């Protein structure tokens, strides 16, 4: 799941953009899947390290940099979201400190803790969607749906690129492939269609309820949730905020864990607790630098929306590992 | 003789000398009896009765109040005095008594002083004979104990009314009565250097994971405590990590629950001296299950379980949520409710955050006071709590009515899930502070931290948050929020080892010599 | 490990304690719960004037009962060069922080409607804590004049005004407009919108107003007789916007027509003039709407079709035993409804105003044509032909009918 982002494209064109973006994302996963199939579940960094230490460290550094950029973008987005919606007066340092601290705690607890927590986040998200569906069904306007490929193609391409750039989960997959119990390529095959369905459904919701106004607001799901009225609460925007907070924290915790794992592989030290804490502090400082000025962050965000981090960490690294990596030798080589 | 009193030696060294285990009984009755008296520090409850049976000098050593006097007279004195075996040699005579005169169902030969003392202190009568280098420990325990009664916790409407008592053997008998299967195995151990508390480890050989059984027995053997006064002493040593919030071990006072959990592949531990048995591994979802769920109709059971889940969440989060909404997000209240709260807060002396904290502390003080007071005075607590603190504080303008209502309601909610009462109490305080500090953001952050903590725990290889995370759909549908009808439940058995995320391990081999003590 | 844990706990406590003061919250008792806001523009002073009603907690007597002898709202006014500044000044007058989440009504004054409506509503839609379902309405003259009139029924005075708009919407007589709905309407090429119009009126008849506490005159405790000449507020049609600015006023029929063209009417009653002193009333239910656009010779034709089931509410002069009452009433009812809608829709459309959602229809039905002419949508709508068809199936003839 990704965070609510600015939606410039309104209408059915966005349906097509999302669909196309997910097709392209699936194609981008191919090098990674081939790595796992060829190297029997190993991650690109593990098989690169097996070939050559320098090669492995280089791959690890590239992945770490791309993951760091993703983590910083996530934390600052969440911090802006909190400031805009929940707590207008919160200091930047307070918001970022709490987010990073909780994420570091999750990373210290391990991969199981973070991934299992995501089940609860998904359950709250499901509850939110059900409640919104029950309360807003009579406010939909089907007139807002019209044939696709109407708008200027420039916006269509921009929207597609933006959707692709949000697929930063590929970087996480690239690191933790060898820790997935079932076959990793199956995980990807389940994940992408599910994500597609969720995003298309959300887009449908935005279009039907908000129509062209959707392209002018920053958090459309928040607005829709604030219009929902159930017996207990007058508006559900609080639940929407809780969902995105949980998603952002879990994503950041995963990223911090991944960097800890990279450190563990590169340094051959199984204990990554200190590394995780130090990395968390580093993320905090970076977020403070980039997050205190919205203009600076917007420049950073526009660079990220080009998808360079996906191409580097999610495509180039697995391709390199596919070509130059080494298989695990049979006979009990320790991972 | 020295006039100075010799202080009792309480050092570990003196303990070790008693527990040496290498000192075998002599063939002389006087030496044996004086040695036993010395080892027992001439304790006043040690009774040694000398008597003669067909010319053979014998003695019975007991602990006062630990044996059945009628059994002593009928089973030991009368047969030995009236019809003893006609054998001259003391050793042969005593051997004949041991083999051909079964006195009681539990009868063992004792060869060393340590075992002899242990049997005496366990309520056995030890028979010694002059000229024989061994003793006979006869199980005629008759110490006073509580009768089987309705359990004080985990009260159910339609389930059994029997609860465990403090005697481990009676408890094991209750378990055996409910599971008449040869696969039910019990391992008796002693834990505690000084207290030598009897502990019985129970499991079904075809259901339980032997790795868990072996891990439990190993941990029990290595517990460094000298005294075990109750089962709770063992909990810290048996848990994988000493969790502040949620325990990985389930305690129950009910033999029917105990047996049901054994059938799910768990390991049970019954400790002498406490009516609470321990069961592990324990999952979070189990705290919301009661025996009544299986006696009511499935739809009603489902409703009750959902109520309990909701009650736990409300009990933990509601005050914090109220504080957060009042201070940071009042737009989430309904209009009429907001206007009422707004008007109430005008007259309150403290801010909402302070009111919640004060009421929370007052409530816990009242609850604790009511628990400790004798019943005759306990009624006064409810009068003081209800009228004085509740009504008067609102009328005097110290507190607002909504806060009093919220704290009272959450108190009731936490009683709906008694196993998690302590966790709920701590979480309530944490959420109040989080909500008052950072509003919904703080509550979410704390909630995520708690999820991380819960989800990182494994109870003997089984994820603590199973079957929710990782998701085991079959188990969720079968017996979590709803319970399937008994017809469907009886189609397949499900053990805790079948849950997703269970660490992949072999079934494990049963250790030989599992019976630690053959009493 | 223990040392690390101890340090971590101490650090967490220190950070928590120091950060506690970093989120300033406002206690609930220090907030002014705004119930209604009126925004006017004073052209001579070139300032915005905000007048608002906020909840008067003193009206809540002991035991949380509402004391009806007191006004349940207080008024505050503020002026400023921007709406934000005016709101801040109004807030300073109350001495409390404004809480807009209970704001039920936003009234736009006459002078302010000469400026872009979107800019005015930006203040509300940009504030995420503002009530998302506050009704937006227009005032006949100044908004402040409307907010000076107080009502004692309901929890606060603004409830009566909000109920006016809500009830009109339920009866399909006027469109209820939340801020996001208005902003959605303004997203069209013509920047058209509609707001219901609230106007003052003088009561000329004896009207009994229910009152919850004693102190009332007239029929015992619980009721109050109105006085002749007492001012009240009524809903009187609406105001249509084009280009974000006021275009014209519409009457009740116009407001109904706009509702029919935009929303789904659940129930609507109207009188059918049959002539010969027969004036039966018909209640329509299950109204469906279909709008199609066709392009011909560079122009557009809109076919609007309404289908509904109806029942005769009151016979209004038709004989009770008349078995063919349904047939007699159906066609005239169709003609009457068609007339009402056409008489309102066509004049507005001729002005190039698309408050009926015609642009969406054009985009849906004539995609390519719209794309080629999207710069002149207003002209297309002004030159378009609109044909309204109504099909009513009378299924019940009321009491005594077949």
Image (cartoon, helix red, strand yellow):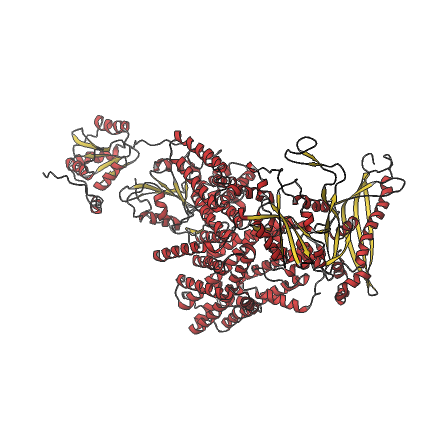
Residue positioned most to the left: B1
Would residue B190 be found to the left or right of residue C124 on screen? left
Placement of the C terminus of chain A among the 4 image quadrants? bottom left
Question: Is B296 above or below relative to A193?
Answer: above
Residue B340: image quadrant is top right
Question: Does residue B361 appear in the picture of this structure?
Answer: yes
Question: Is C164 above or below relative to A305?
Answer: above
Residue positioned most to the front: C44
Q: Position of residue C153 (x, y in %)?
A: 66, 40
Foreground residue among B73 and B460: B460
Q: How many numbered callouts? A: 0
Task: Look at 73% across and 37% down and name the residue there.
Answer: C207
Question: Is B235 above or below relative to A255?
Answer: above
Placement of the N terminus of chain A among the 4 image quadrants? bottom right
Foreground residue among B372 and B141: B372
Q: Position of residue B134 (x, y in %)?
A: 20, 38
Question: Does residue B305 appear in the picture of this structure?
Answer: no
Would residue C226 be found to the left or right of residue B207 on screen? right
Foreground residue among B170 and A142: A142
Foreground residue among A87 and B395: B395
Would residue B267 be found to the left or right of residue C98 on screen? left
Residue C387: image quadrant is bottom right
Q: Position of residue B24 (x, y in %)?
A: 19, 42
Task: Look at 34% across and 36% down and name the residue there.
Answer: B167
Q: Position of residue C327 (x, y in %)?
A: 86, 42
Question: Is C65 above or below relative to B505?
Answer: above
């Amino acid at each position: 799941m990704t965070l609510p982002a600015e939606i410039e494209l309104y209408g059915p064109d966005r349906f097509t953009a999302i669909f196309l973006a997910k097709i392209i994302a699936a194609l981008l996963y191919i090098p990674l899947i081939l790595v796992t199939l060829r190297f029997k579940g190993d991650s690109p960094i593990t098989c690169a390290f097996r070939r050559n230490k320098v090669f492995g460290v280089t791959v690890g550094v590239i992945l770490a940099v791309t993951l760091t950029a993703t983590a910083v973008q996530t934390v600052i987005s969440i911090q802006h979201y909190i400031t805009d919606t929940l707590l207008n007066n919160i200091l930047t340092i307070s918001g970022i400190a709490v987010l990073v601290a909780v994420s570091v705690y999750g990373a210290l607890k391990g991969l199981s803790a973070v991934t299992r927590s995501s089940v609860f986040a998904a359950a709250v998200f499901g509850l939110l969607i059900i409640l919104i569906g029950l309360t807003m069904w009579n406010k939909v306007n089907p007139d807002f749906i019209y044939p696709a490929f109407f708008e200027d193609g420039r916006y269509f391409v921009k929207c597609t690129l933006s959707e692709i750039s949000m697929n930063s989960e590929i970087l996480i997959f690239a690191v933790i492939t060898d820790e997935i119990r079932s076959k990793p390529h199956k995980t990807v095959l389940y994940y992408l269609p599910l994500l597609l369905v969720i995003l298309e459904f959300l887009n449908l919701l935005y279009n039907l309820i908000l129509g062209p106004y959707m392209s002018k607001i920053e958090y459309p799901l928040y607005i829709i949730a604030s219009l929902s009225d159930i017996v207990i609460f007058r508006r559900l925007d609080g639940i929407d905020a809780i969902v995105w907070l949980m998603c952002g924290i879990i994503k950041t915790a995963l990223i911090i864990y991944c960097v800890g794992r990279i450190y563990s592989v590169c340094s051959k030290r199984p204990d990554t607790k200190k590394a995780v804490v130090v990395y968390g502090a580093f993320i905090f400082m970076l977020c403070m630098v980039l997050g205190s000025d919205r203009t600076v962050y917007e420049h950073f965000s526009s660079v990220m929306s080009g998808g360079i981090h996906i191409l580097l960490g999610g495509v180039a690294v697995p391709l390199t590992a596919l070509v130059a990596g080494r298989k695990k030798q049979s006979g009990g080589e320790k991972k | 003789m020295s006039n100075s009193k010799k202080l009792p030696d309480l050092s570990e060294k003196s303990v070790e000398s008693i527990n040496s285990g290498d000192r075998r009984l002599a063939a002389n009755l006087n030496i044996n009896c004086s040695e036993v008296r010395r080892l027992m520090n001439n304790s006043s409850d040690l009774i040694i009765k000398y008597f003669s049976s067909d010319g053979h000098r014998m003695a019975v050593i007991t602990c006062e109040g630990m044996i059945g006097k009628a059994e002593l007279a009928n089973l030991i004195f009368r047969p030995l005095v009236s019809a003893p075996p006609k054998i001259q040699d003391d050793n042969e005579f005593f051997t004949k008594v041991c083999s051909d005169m079964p006195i009681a169902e539990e009868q063992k030969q004792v060869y060393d002083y340590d075992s002899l003392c242990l049997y005496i202190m366990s309520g056995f009568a030890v028979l010694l004979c002059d000229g024989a280098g061994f003793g006979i420990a006869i199980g005629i325990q008759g110490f006073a104990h509580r009768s089987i009664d309705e359990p004080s916790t985990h009260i159910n409407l339609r389930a059994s009314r029997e609860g465990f008592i403090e005697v481990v053997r009676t408890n094991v008998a209750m378990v055996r009565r409910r599971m008449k299967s040869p696969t039910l195995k019990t391992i008796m151990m002693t834990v505690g250097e000084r207290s030598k508390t009897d502990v019985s480890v129970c499991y079904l050989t075809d259901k339980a994971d032997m790795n868990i059984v072996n891990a439990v027995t190993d941990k029990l053997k290595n517990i460094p405590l000298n005294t075990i006064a109750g089962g709770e002493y063992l909990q810290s040593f048996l848990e994988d990590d000493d969790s502040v919030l949620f325990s990985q071990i389930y305690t129950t006072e009910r033999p029917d629950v105990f047996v049901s959990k054994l059938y799910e592949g768990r390991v049970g531990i019954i400790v002498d001296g406490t009516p609470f048995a321990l069961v592990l591994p324990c999952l979070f979802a189990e705290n919301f299950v009661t025996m009544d769920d299986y006696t009511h109709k499935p739809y009603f059971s489902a409703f009750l379980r959902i109520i309990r889940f909701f009650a736990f969440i409300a009990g933990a989060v509601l005050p914090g949520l109220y504080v957060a909404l009042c201070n940071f997000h009042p737009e989430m209240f309904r209009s009429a409710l907001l206007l009422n709260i707004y008007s109430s807060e005008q007259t309150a002396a403290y801010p909402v955050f302070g009111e919640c904290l004060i009421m929370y502390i007052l409530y816990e003080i009242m609850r604790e006071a009511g628990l400790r007071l004798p019943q005759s005075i306990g009624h006064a607590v409810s009068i003081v709590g209800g009228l004085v603190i509740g009504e008067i504080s609102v009328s005097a303008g110290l507190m607002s009515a909504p806060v009093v209502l919220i704290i009272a309601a959450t108190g009731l909610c936490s009683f709906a899930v008694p196993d998690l009462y302590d966790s709920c109490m701590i979480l309530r305080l944490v959420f109040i502070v989080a909500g008052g500090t950072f509003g919904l953001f703080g509550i979410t952050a704390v909630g995520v931290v708690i999820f991380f903590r819960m989800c990182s725990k494994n109870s003997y290889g089984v994820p603590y948050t199973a079957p929710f995370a990782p998701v085991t759909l079959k188990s969720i549908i079968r017996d979590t929020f709803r319970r399937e009808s008994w017809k469907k439940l009886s189609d397949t058995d499900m053990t805790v080892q079948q849950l997703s995320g269970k660490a992949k391990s072999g079934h494990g081999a049963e250790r030989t010599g599992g019976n630690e003590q053959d009493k | 490990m223990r040392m690390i844990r101890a340090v971590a706990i101490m650090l967490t406590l220190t950070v928590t304690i120091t950060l506690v003061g970093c989120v300033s919250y406002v206690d609930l008792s220090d907030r002014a719960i705004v119930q209604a806001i009126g925004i006017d523009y004073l052209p001579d002073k070139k300032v915005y004037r905000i007048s608002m009603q906020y909840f008067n907690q003193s009206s809540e007597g002991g035991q949380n009962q509402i004391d009806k002898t007191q006004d349940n709202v207080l008024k505050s006014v503020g002026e400023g060069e921007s709406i934000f500044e005016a709101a801040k000044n109004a807030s300073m007058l109350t001495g409390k922080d404004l809480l807009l989440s209970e704001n039920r009504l936003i009234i736009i004054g006459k002078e302010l409607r000469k400026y872009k409506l979107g800019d005015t509503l930006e203040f509300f839609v940009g504030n995420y804590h503002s009530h998302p379902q506050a009704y937006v309405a227009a005032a006949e003259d100044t908004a402040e004049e409307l907010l000076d009139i107080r009502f004692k029924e309901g929890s606060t005075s603004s409830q009566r005004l909000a109920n006016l708009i809500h009830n009109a919407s339920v009866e399909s007589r006027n469109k209820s407009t939340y801020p996001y709905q208005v902003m959605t309407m303004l997203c069209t090429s013509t920047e058209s919108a509609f707001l219901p119009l609230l106007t003052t009126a003088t009561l000329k008849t004896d009207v009994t107003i229910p009152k919850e506490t004693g102190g009332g005159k007239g029929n015992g405790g619980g009721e109050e007789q109105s006085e002749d000449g007492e001012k009240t507020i009524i809903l009187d049609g609406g105001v249509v916007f084009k280009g974000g600015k006021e275009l014209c006023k519409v009457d009740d029929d116009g407001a109904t027509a706009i509702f029919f063209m935009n929303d789904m009417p659940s129930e609507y009653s109207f009188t059918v003039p049959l002539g010969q002193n027969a004036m039966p009333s018909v209640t329509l239910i299950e109204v469906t709407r279909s709008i199609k656009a066709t392009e011909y010779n560079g122009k557009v034709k809109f076919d609007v079709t309404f289908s509904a089931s109806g029942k005769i509410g009151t016979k209004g002069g038709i004989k009770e035993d008349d078995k063919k009452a349904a047939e007699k009433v159906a066609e005239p009812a169709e003609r009457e409804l068609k007339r009402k809608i056409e008489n309102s829709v066509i004049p507005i459309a001729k002005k190039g105003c698309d408050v009926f959602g015609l642009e969406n229809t054009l985009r849906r039905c004539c995609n390519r044509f719209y794309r080629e002419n999207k710069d002149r949508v207003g002209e297309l709508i002004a030159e378009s032909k609109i044909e309204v068809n109504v099909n009513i199936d009378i299924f019940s003839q009321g009491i005594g009918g077949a």
